[in-house]
């Protein structure tokens, strides 16, 4: 595994990434490559690399797992901005970097994403046709979630509050950084925050199970207004032409991945190959790292990605 940072001419800051290599990696060959997109509030060291990235590298792919702009070890100020437009642009920026690497085959690039990262991966695939196939793992349309549960079903009220807070900050006021989860499982129980997705997110992000320094689970409130006007699945019927797989658990939670997964699958009618994988008895956060559901997901994902991205896994690189 290699730690790296990069930027291109469209960027004013560095993107930090982990590159995971297949066994017996040979830099004289070219490899199919997967860009792995982390969840909302997460970082590259969590499920995007440690679970799915690791597994796909073992199957012969080069995997690039990176931190979103404004988050983790990547640059961008102010910190903890969740901007869907930038999150989608980040994916294309990572691909821009990948195609400069001599061992990456520019014609064999796929994208996977988990949770909000799944929504971003799907959105990027609509317009970046360098992506040959996409897998959304328990994907969430962050725009829909912000308009609904994250704004207490009052998106206009949220936008007014964000506007007032942004004006205050522009005039020198303190930044409002919202913590997205209880500090511990005990606090979640104390305040009755027992809804499945909230409680299981706390178990993942706030315990040794998944906790990482870069997984901040916080958001700059004043800069989230663009999120409420964004739709991960806009124009999917027309633009989602590449093969798409959606993996969802049937234990439904408040963040809405089951609903969103069904929606993007149903709308991707122009896709050359669309597949829906529903896993009985598993939840959104089970698919982050639990051995059995992750194994079931990979059992479907690996053949799908090998078919549409790998084409034999490695190839000899032609001499310059």
Image (cartoon, rainbow, N blue to C red):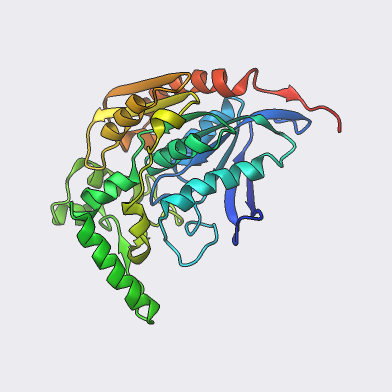
Determine the residue positioned at 34% across, 66% down. Answer: 222
Q: Residue furthest right?
A: 320
Q: Quadrant of the C terminus?
A: top right
Residue 89, x across and y down, in percent: 52, 48
- The quarter of the displayed image where residue 232 is located: top left
Locate residue 302 relative to residue 274 in the image: left or right.
right
Residue 66, x across and y down, in percent: 54, 47
Please say whether residue 1 is visible from this viewpoint.
no
Determine the residue positioned at 41% across, 38% down. Answer: 118
284 w.r.t. 166: above or below: above
Closer to the camera in the image, 197 or 109: 109
Residue 317, x across and y down, in percent: 78, 27
Q: Quadrant of the N terminus?
A: top right
Closer to the camera in the image, 34 or 183: 34
Determine the residue positioned at 23% across, 55% down. Answer: 155
- The quarter of the displayed image where residue 290 is located: top left
47 w.r.t. 12: above or below: above
Q: How many marks?
A: 0
Please say whether residue 204 is visible from this viewpoint.
yes
Locate residue 192 relative to residue 217 in the image: left or right.
left
């Amino acid at each position: 595994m290699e730690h790296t940072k990069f930027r291109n001419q469209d960027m004013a800051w560095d993107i930090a990434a982990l590159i995971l290599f297949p066994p017996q990696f040979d830099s004289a060959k070219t490899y199919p490559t997967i860009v792995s997109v982390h969840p909302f509030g997460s970082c590259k060291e969590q499920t995007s690399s440690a679970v799915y990235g690791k597994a796909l590298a073992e199957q012969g792919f080069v995997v690039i797992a990176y931190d979103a702009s404004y988050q983790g070890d990547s640059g961008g100020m102010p910190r903890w901005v969740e901007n869907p437009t930038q999150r989608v642009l980040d994916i294309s920026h990572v691909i821009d970097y990948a195609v400069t690497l001599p061992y990456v085959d520019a014609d064999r690039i796929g994208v996977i994403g988990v949770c909000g990262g799944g929504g971003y991966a799907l959105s990027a695939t609509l317009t970046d046709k360098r992506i040959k196939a996409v897998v959304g793992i328990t994907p969430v349309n962050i725009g829909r979630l912000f308009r609904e549960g994250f704004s207490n079903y009052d998106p206009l009220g949220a936008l007014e509050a964000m506007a007032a807070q942004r004006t205050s900050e522009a005039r020198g006021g303190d930044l409002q950084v919202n913590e997205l989860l209880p500090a511990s499982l005990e606090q979640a129980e104390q305040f009755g925050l027992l809804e499945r997705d909230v409680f299981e997110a706390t178990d993942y992000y706030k315990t040794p199970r998944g906790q990482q320094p870069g997984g901040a689970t916080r958001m700059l409130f004043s800069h989230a207004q663009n999120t409420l006007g964004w739709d991960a699945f806009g124009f999917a019927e027309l633009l989602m032409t590449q093969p798409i797989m959606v993996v969802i658990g049937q234990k439904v939670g408040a963040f809405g991945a089951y609903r969103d997964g069904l929606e993007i699958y149903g709308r991707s009618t122009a896709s050359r190959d669309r597949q829906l994988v529903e896993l009985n008895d598993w939840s959104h956060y089970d698919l982050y790292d639990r051995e059995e559901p992750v194994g079931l997901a990979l059992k479907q994902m690996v053949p799908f990605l090998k078919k549409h991205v790998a084409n034999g896994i490695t190839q000899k690189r032609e001499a310059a």
